[in-house]
Amino acid sequence: MGAWRSNIEVWESFDYQKKLASLPDLEGKLNINTATKEELILLLGIGPTYSTRIIEARPFNRIEDIQKIKGIGPKTFERIKNRISLTDENPE
């Protein structure tokens, strides 16, 4: 059963990676209060686990509040702080 489970995890990971590859590059700032999981993953150092934690911790009142999430500390914040916001700065 272990090998079967491993094959499923690899397949799911492959599908997920294909989905991410189809997303456009992140331009401008990303609203951390409204961004999708896939959009959050485009931020350097934010993967599926952290993006889920960000979504579950919403709403944020300040971008610095993202550091309250387990695993997102000062180093990660420094890498992403210029790429995140609390407003939609790029309306379509």
Image (spheres, rainbow, N blue to C red):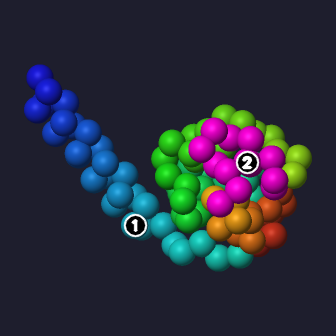
Classify mark 1: residues with Cα within 10 Å, few (<14), some (14-19) or many (20+): few
In the picture, residue 26 is in which quadrant? Answer: bottom right
- Please name the residue that numbered disc 1 is placed on: 21
- Residue at 14%, 27% (x, y): give it: 2
The magenta span reads 63-75
Q: Position of residue 63 (x, y in %)?
A: 81, 55
One can see residue 80 in this view: no
Left or right, 48 with reference to 55: left
The residue lying furthest to the right in this view is: 61
Tell me if label 2 and label 1 are in contact, CB under 8 Å: no
- Residue at 29%, 44% (x, y): give it: 12
One can see residue 1 in this view: yes
What main secondary structure does the magenta stretch of the protein show? helix
The residue lying furthest to the top in this view is: 1
Q: Position of residue 30 (x, y in %)?
A: 71, 63
Q: Position of residue 88 (x, y in %)?
A: 80, 63
Q: Is residue 72 magenta?
A: yes
Judge by depth and name the residue closer to the eye, 78 or 2: 78
Q: Position of residue 15 (x, y in %)?
A: 31, 52
| Number of marks | 2
Badge 1 element: helix
If the image is split into quadrants, where does the C terminus sit?
bottom right
Badge 2 element: helix
- Please name the residue that numbered disc 2 is placed on: 67
